[in-house]
Amino acid sequence: MATRNRWAIAGAGFLMQMALGAVYAWSVFRTPLTTRFHWSISQVTLTFTICIFVLGIAAFFGGLWLNKSGPRVVALTGGFLYGLGVFLASFSADKLWWLYLSYGVISGIGLGFGYIVPVAVLLKWFPDRRGLITGIAVGGFGAGALVTAPVATHLIQSVGVLQTFANLGIAYLVVTMATGYMMQNPPAGWKPEGWTPKPSVIAQRSTTDYTLSTALATWQWWALWLLLFLNTSAGISLISQEAPIFHEIAKVSAISAGFMVGIASIGNAFGRIFWAATSDFLTRRWTFVVMFLIQVGLFWITPTLSTPAYLTGVAFVILMCYGGGFGTMPAFAADYFGSKNIGPIYGLMLTAWGCASAFGPLLIAHLRQSTGSYTSGLRIVAVIMLVSIIGPIIVRPPRPKTLSESVAAAR
């Protein structure tokens, strides 16, 4: 019965993440908002930046709250705030500050609360398939825009951009509240019947459940934060400039560039599941090594690719690696610090996402402006990825050195 229940919870977690991941479809609102209200592109884009930044902070506090009150109340609160924020954005007519507050801050808080719950819950239900299950969970987040973007585009054409916010807000509220209600932890000490971890798996896992404070006292927590930051910075630098890069390098039209962006974005969702599942047998460390190596080569050759099909394929694989970081890191953190307190431990680690969302796009945009092309920016990212390989090669699970440290880590 428990086995069947855990897969039902996994399905609910995937659907919840799909609703939350609809935030990645923000670009479809950019032109309608700038056209109707005469806001600049940078003013409208700042809404998305605020939302993602708030998400990273709220995920940490959601993880702390999850440990105290349980996953259901955090999931329901997150779903409510997310749906409410998007709905309230429908009252943004001529009030840019209201758009920032509603879609940026309120829905961002809801996103952070909601995002961390399926990750933390499913890691406890699937100790035997940590990589696969976290890949499925956050894969839903990556796939959200694939569904929402065409739906939102149709609604905008039919009822206008503000009414679209209202309609989507209600839909998000219903989906996240229904799926959030199913979020619950397994009984203490639960594990799948007959499952015993292999020696190779045990060697890659910590022997204790760390608290947030004891995890932060290890260099490994900071190493994993840095790995997530570096991988995210690389992928999001491409995401932030995808259409202009396609237009400049492959000389395609704006419409064709948009189509290429849509195809490449599928890699974000697919990579979350593919690389996370791969990490279950390749190990998390070597999965990151492979992803970094792939990105070294692809970022370096991207400026030389004038064929749209080749350029789209390369972008697809880069975004697979970008999504793979989000799919693999929750299991990586659980391996090193245990699943008991993974909510706050990984929640705080997600601040790397917010920092990378500023660093990567600003780096490549600055280099494009200063050099007149994307070549130097893309190749500097390739060099950064090359140096980054050192991280996953040297990182190892933390091992408490003394009995008192072991006891403290287990509390």
Image (cartoon, grey):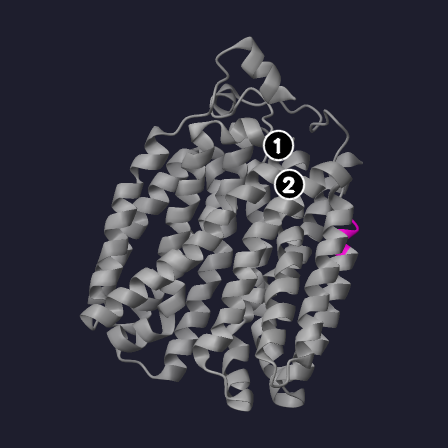
The dominant secondary structure in magenta is loop
Is residue 4 in view from this perspective?
no
The earlier-in-sequence mark between 2 and 1 is: 2
Tell me the magenta residue range: 179-183
Mark 2: amino acid: Ala
Q: Position of residue 214 (x, y in %)?
A: 55, 26
Query: Horizontally, is 82 left or right of 306 in the view?
Result: right
Q: Residue at x 26, y 76 (%)?
A: 248
Query: Horizontally, is 9 left or right of 409 in the view?
Result: right
- Judge whether residue 181 is colored magenta: yes
Residue 180 higher or lower than 307, as above or below: above
Give the labeled residue for mark 2: 120
Q: Quadrant of the N terminus?
A: top right
SS category of the residue bearing label 1 = loop
- Judge whether residue 404 is colored magenta: no
Q: Position of residue 241 (x, y in %)?
A: 36, 69
Query: Horizontally, is 156 left or right of 280 in the view?
Result: right
* Callout 2 touching callout 1 (CB < 8 Å): yes
Give the labeled residue for mark 1: 339
